[in-house]
Image (cartoon, rainbow, N blue to C red):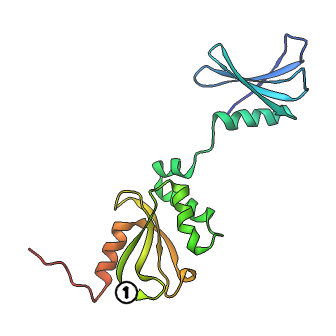
């Protein structure tokens, strides 16, 4: 919990104690027991302007945790991706590990907040994959870190997921393909 609450005596008859935490920007959060319902509630004091009261908690700790979660929400994978793309991609792979292979890349795309999934096409492979060599979460940048799903031999059950860039994957596979013709040098 990021908020550090201090227990203070109440000056009213409505409750004996209340808890207060001060935010770095000077605002404060108060947790108190409602005199009407005996349930605990929290309220943000926004520079002298009281905000809505959020209540219905059985214990002061529960109200404190709710206030903490409301003021300091956990970052999404899209937020983490902006700071550390490799970490975000690995977390997305872990969180989707139990999904079926054919749904997994779409789920990763949603978690990372990328721009859909795209196919990397090459020579004809087989009747299942056709000419798709791999699929990836489109970041909008060829050399931005993303998740790639590399095709298997026959179906999604044999594919594998890797963290890398689409550009590096294409370059590496063009060089390793003995049947490919290098571009004409000018």
Question: Quick one: label 1, few (<14), some, or many (20+) residues within 10 Å?
Answer: few
In depth, the one of 144 and 135 nearer the eye is: 135
In depth, the one of 56 and 85 nearer the eye is: 56
Q: Secondary structure at mark 1?
A: strand
Vertical order, 94 against 37 (above or below) = below
Tell me the residue at 63%/36% (across/down). Answer: 72
- The N terminus lies in which quarter of the figure? top right
Left or right of 176 on screen, residue 47:
right
Residue 124 position, x and y percent, is: 37, 86
Vertical order, 80 against 182 (above or below) = above
Tell me the residue at 46%/49% (across/down). Answer: 82
- The C terminus lies in which quarter of the figure? bottom left
Tell me the residue at 53%/64% (across/down). Answer: 106
Residue 141 position, x and y percent, is: 35, 57
Residue 35 position, x and y percent, is: 89, 20
Q: Quadrant of residue 179?
A: bottom left
Q: Quadrant of residue 169?
A: bottom left
Q: Which residue is mark 1?
A: 124
Left or right of 147 on screen, residue 42:
right
């Amino acid at each position: 919990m990021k908020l550090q609450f201090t227990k203070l005596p109440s000056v009213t008859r409505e409750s004996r104690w209340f808890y207060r935490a001060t935010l770095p920007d000077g605002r404060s959060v108060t947790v108190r027991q409602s005199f009407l319902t005996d349930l605990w509630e929290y309220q943000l004091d926004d520079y002298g302007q009281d905000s809505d009261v959020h209540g219905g908690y059985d214990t002061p700790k529960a109200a404190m945790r709710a206030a903490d979660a409301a003021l300091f929400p956990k970052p999404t994978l899209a937020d983490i991706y902006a700071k550390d793309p490799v970490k975000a991609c690995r977390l997305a792979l872990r969180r989707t590990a139990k999904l079926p292979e054919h749904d997994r890349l779409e789920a990763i795309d949603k978690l990372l907040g990328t721009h859909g999934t795209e196919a990397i096409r090459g020579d004809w492979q087989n009747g299942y994959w056709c000419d798709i060599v791999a699929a990836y979460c489109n970041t909008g940048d060829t050399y931005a870190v993303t998740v790639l799903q590399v095709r298997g031999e026959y179906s999604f059950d044999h594919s594998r997921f890797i963290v890398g860039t689409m550009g590096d994957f294409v370059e590496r596979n063009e060089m390793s393909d003995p049947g490919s013709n290098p571009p004409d040098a000018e």
